[in-house]
Structures are given as structure tokens and as C-alpha cells.
Image (cartoon, rainbow, N blue to C red):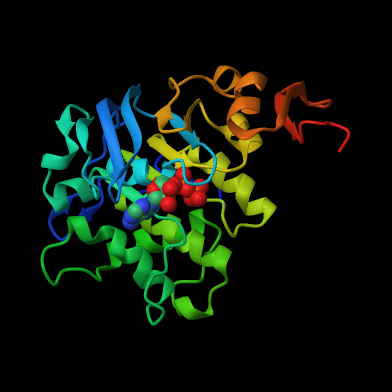
């Protein structure tokens, strides 16, 4: 993905139909207090409290069905918590209007499928909706924001391509571009590397660290979470472990208990940067 500016696409001061998209370099602090989340009738994450600093990249990991998506939906404000509350920069998320929320939190859901008859550029432009008056849109400035976002995710020139003619990975990157033009202080990504080839997988994770916004993402690949996240939240058996730096959150004993696999943190032979090596419990297998 092509070297983004500080905010991904350059939306600083973007004037959209008379409104200025608000950008604040230090926004996006998230406070979670006594949160309990349920899927259907079942509480999947109980009594969780943590604080995310503005600009941090946070990974949520846990085995299948432990509540990563459910927690992200609550952090996005689209699912109500059973108990507790989420605040973003001091404002209680679930009391915000839909428009205010859409200016605060952008989401790329798991396996999201935009309408097949839209073009890629139209999908990205949906991210500008929170800044538009009714029936607004389509100005050259907005088109420029869409084109810049597409270039950021390495899809320059794809604006006119119908969504049904995109590959799974290209569609995933279009959805990320939509979230980038939304220009929110908080970005929530549910398994964002699904469908991506290894190049775009690594580029996406590197990109999240250059956006100067708070990124919270559910990830299955523990080695990538370890490498690219400032801190990690591990979900297991209905509880969230304390939010901690990767070396603590994914210590070998924790990985063994939660995932039943063997973890070893080894320095990369060329760079010396620690990498998490995951094998079955019997490392010879
Ligand atoms: N609408 C629903 N009604 C009842 N139970 C649900 C509903 N949606 C999800 N669940 C259950 O809630 C639990 C948490 O689901 P969730 O999708 O949040 O987990 P996850 O950690 O994201 O899983 P995965 O890693 O498989 O994507 C699972 O046991 C799931 O079966």
C-alpha cells in the first residue's frame, strides 16, 4: 500500500459541502469500564475494564467463538453492552447520535459484502456520508479524497471497477479505504488480513501504525499481532486478560493455556527484532 500521509488519505481540513472534517492529532482515547458483552442471550465477555491511549494499535486475540467480534461491535457502538460503558475522548459512545458516532469510529466488519452493483469508488465514498448534508456528495474534493484513499490501499485506478468484479482481497482493501476516508479518531478492524496476500497483509498492518489514530483489530495470527500491535487483549473462557504489551500478553505460558500451542519468542537473525514462533505443543511436529 502506497506510503500514506499522516492520516492515510490527506483529509486534513477537507471541506465537504460546507463542513470541515474534524481531525485532532491526539483524539481517540478509549475507556472501557465494567463492560459485559452478550451475543444472543449468552454473555461472552464479562466485567472488562481497560484504557486505550490515543494513537495506540491494539490487537484482540482469542480462540474461535471467544467474543472478539462481539466486543468489537460493542466498541463500535452498534451493539449495546449488557453492563458497563465505553467512552471515546470522554464521550459515552452509546449516547452519541449515529452521525456523531460515524465521525468517531470507523469499522470494517468481518467478511463484509458491499452491494455488488456499486463501483469501488462509490463504496469508498460511503465513508464520507457522516460529513454530507442529505443528497450531498459528488464534489471534486470528495472524488479526490476517494482517489487518495484508494491509492493508499494500492488500488489506484480502481474507482470505476464494479464491486462484483473485485477479488476478495481487493474488496477488503476497498472497505479499508472507505474506513480511511471516514477519517475518525478510532478505527476498528475485524480480521482485516482475511483474504489478503502476504504482501498486502504486511502492508496493511504496517499501515495501521502510520495512521496516527487509534486502531483496534481482531487478529488470528498471533505472530502478526505480536509484531504489529502496541498492546494485546487476550479473550479466553468469557474473560479478557489485562491489556498488556505483546511479550506479556502472549507469554509462552499464556499461549499454551489459551490456544494449546507452543510459543517461542526469537530474535530475527537479520534484524534482531523479536518474532513469535508458533508450533504445535510438540515442537518437532
Ligand atoms: N446472534 C447470536 N446469537 C447467539 N449466539 C451468538 C450470536 N452471534 C454469535 N454468537 C455466539 O457468541 C460467541 C462469540 O461470537 P463472536 O463472533 O463474537 O466470536 P469470535 O471470537 O469473533 O469468533 P471467531 O474467531 O470464530 O470469528 C460464539 O460462541 C458464537 O457462537
Above or below, 85 relative to 244: below
Image-quadrant location for residue 196: bottom right
- Residue 190 visible within the image: no
Residue at 32 percent across and 30 percent down: it is 46
- Where residue 72 appears, as percent x and y from the top left, is 36, 43
- Residue 240 visible within the image: yes
Judge by depth and name the residue closer to the eye, 284 or 213. 284
Q: Is residue 43 left or right of residue 131?
A: right
Quadrant, the C terminus: top right
Above or below, 9 relative to 257: below
Marker count (numbered): 0
Residue at 61 percent across and 49 percent down: it is 201
- Where residue 82 appears, as percent x and y from the top left, is 21, 38
- Where residue 29 appears, as percent x and y from the top left, is 29, 27
Q: Is residue 23 left or right of residue 117?
A: left
Residue at 52 percent across and 20 percent down: it is 245
Residue at 36 percent across and 45 percent down: it is 70
Above or below, 218 relative to 86: below
Judge by depth and name the residue closer to the eye, 208 or 41. 41
Q: Is residue 90 left or right of residue 280?
A: left
- Residue extending farthest to the front is 41
Q: Is residue 26 left or right of residue 239?
A: left
- Residue extending farthest to the top is 248
- Residue extending farthest to the bottom is 117
- Where residue 209 appears, as percent x and y from the top left, is 50, 35
Amino acid at each position: 500500500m502506497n506510503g500514506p500521509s499522516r492520516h492515510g488519505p490527506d483529509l486534513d481540513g477537507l471541506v465537504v459541502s460546507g463542513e470541515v472534517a474534524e481531525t485532532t492529532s491526539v483524539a481517540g482515547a478509549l475507556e472501557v469500564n465494567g463492560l459485559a458483552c452478550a451475543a444472543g442471550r449468552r454473555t461472552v465477555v464479562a466485567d472488562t475494564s481497560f484504557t486505550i491511549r490515543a494513537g495506540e494499535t491494539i490487537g484482540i486475540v482469542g480462540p474461535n467463538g471467544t467474543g472478539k467480534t462481539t466486543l468489537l461491535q460493542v466498541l463500535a457502538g452498534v451493539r449495546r453492552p449488557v453492563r458497563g460503558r465505553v467512552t471515546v475522548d470522554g464521550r459515552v459512545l452509546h449516547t452519541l447520535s449515529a452521525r456523531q458516532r460515524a465521525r468517531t469510529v470507523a469499522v470494517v466488519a468481518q467478511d463484509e459484502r458491499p452491494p455488488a452493483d456499486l463501483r469501488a469508488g462509490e463504496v469508498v465514498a460511503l465513508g464520507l456520508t457522516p460529513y454530507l448534508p442529505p443528497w450531498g456528495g459528488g464534489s471534486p474534493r470528495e472524488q479526490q479524497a476517494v482517489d487518495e484513499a484508494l491509492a493508499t490501499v494500492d488500488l489506484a485506478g480502481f474507482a470505476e471497477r464494479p464491486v462484483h468484479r473485485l477479488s476478495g482481497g481487493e474488496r477488503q482493501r476497498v472497505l479499508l479505504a472507505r474506513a480511511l476516508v471516514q477519517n475518525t479518531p478510532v478505527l476498528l478492524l475485524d480480521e482485516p488480513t482475511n483474504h489478503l496476500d502476504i504482501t498486502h497483509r504486511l502492508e496493511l498492518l504496517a499501515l495501521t501504525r502510520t495512521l496516527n489514530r487509534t486502531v483496534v483489530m481482531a487478529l488470528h495470527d498471533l505472530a502478526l499481532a505480536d509484531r504489529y500491535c502496541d498492546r494485546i487483549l487476550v479473550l479466553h473462557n468469557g474473560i479478557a486478560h489485562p491489556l498488556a504489551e505483546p511479550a506479556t500478553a502472549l507469554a509462552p505460558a499464556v499461549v499454551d493455556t489459551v490456544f494449546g500451542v507452543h510459543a517461542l519468542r526469537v530474535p530475527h537473525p537479520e534484524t534482531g527484532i523479536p518474532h513469535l514462533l508458533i508450533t504445535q505443543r510438540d515442537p518437532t511436529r
